[in-house]
Image: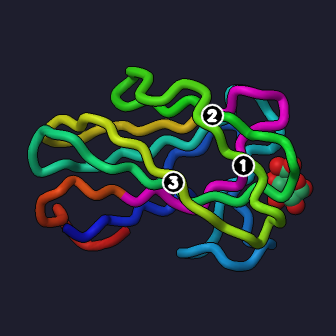
């Protein structure tokens, strides 16, 4: 099934900044976690039915240090200290995918920086719930 893309710059952002100074992002920009532990991006996404979904985060990390983040779904940790290693440049974007259970209806998916470096720059979250997408791309 097709994945639905949810842009970071349209999500709820805590202690981060929406920026667009490094090319290659989708949408209109990305979120810079501003080198703060606990800064996060939180998406609210609809799922047509309960079940397992693939969550793909697109990011760039122009440093050589891992910018680990906790990924929570509806407040429960789905991936603790998920690795976001260096990508070689802030303009080099890559993806990492995890699997998590979604419930039917609205779900909150949060990616929270766990180190004082903050998270990587986050472009978007793409969700493939296996079935037909619930709506257009946003
Ligand atoms: C640089 C880069 C930012 C990035 C930041 C960081 O300032 O230009 O886009 O967010 O480093 O260390 O996270």
* Mark with earlier residue (1, 3): 3
Q: CA distance from mark 2 to mark 3?
A: 11 Å
Say if mark 2 contacts mark 1, CB within 8 Å: yes
- Residue sitting at x 25%, y 73%: 136
Say if mark 2 contacts mark 3, CB within 8 Å: no
Q: Quadrant of the C terminus?
A: bottom left
Residue bearing mark 2: 69
Which mark is drawn over residue 133? none
- Residue sitting at x 45%, y 50%: 97
Say if mark 1 contacts mark 3, CB within 8 Å: no
* Mark with earlier residue (2, 1): 2
Q: Position of residue 132 (x, y in %)?
A: 12, 65
Query: Is ligand 1 less than 8 Å from the beta carbon at label 1?
Result: yes
Q: Position of residue 131 (x, y in %)?
A: 12, 59
Q: Position of residue 122 (x, y in %)?
A: 63, 55
Residue 16 inside the magenta-drawn segment = no
Q: CA distance from mark 1 to mark 3?
A: 11 Å
Left or right, 46 with reference to 109: left
Left or right, 67 with reference to 80: right
Callout 1 crowding tier (Cα within 10 Å): few <14, some 14–19, many ≥20? many
Residue bearing mark 1: 120
Q: CA distance from mark 2 to mark 1?
A: 9 Å
Colour mapping used in the image: rainbow
Say which element carries label 1. Answer: loop
* Mark with earlier residue (2, 3): 3
Q: Point out the stretch of residues depicted in magenta.
A: 113-126
Whether 81 is drawn above or below 43: the answer is above
């Amino acid at each position: 099934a097709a994945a639905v893309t949810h842009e970071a710059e349209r999500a709820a952002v805590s202690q981060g900044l929406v920026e667009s100074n490094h090319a290659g992002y989708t949408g209109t920009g990305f979120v810079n976690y501003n080198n703060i532990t606990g800064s996060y991006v939180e998406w609210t996404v609809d799922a047509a039915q309960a079940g397992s979904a693939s969550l793909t985060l697109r990011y760039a990390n122009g440093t050589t240090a891992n910018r680990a983040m906790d990924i929570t779904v509806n407040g429960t940790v789905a991936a603790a200290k998920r690795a976001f290693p260096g990508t070689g440049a802030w303009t080099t974007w890559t993806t990492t995918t995890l699997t998590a259970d979604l419930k039917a209806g609205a779900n909150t998916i949060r990616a929270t920086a766990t180190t004082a470096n903050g998270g990587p720059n986050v472009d978007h979250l793409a969700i493939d719930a296996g079935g037909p997408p619930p709506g257009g791309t946003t």
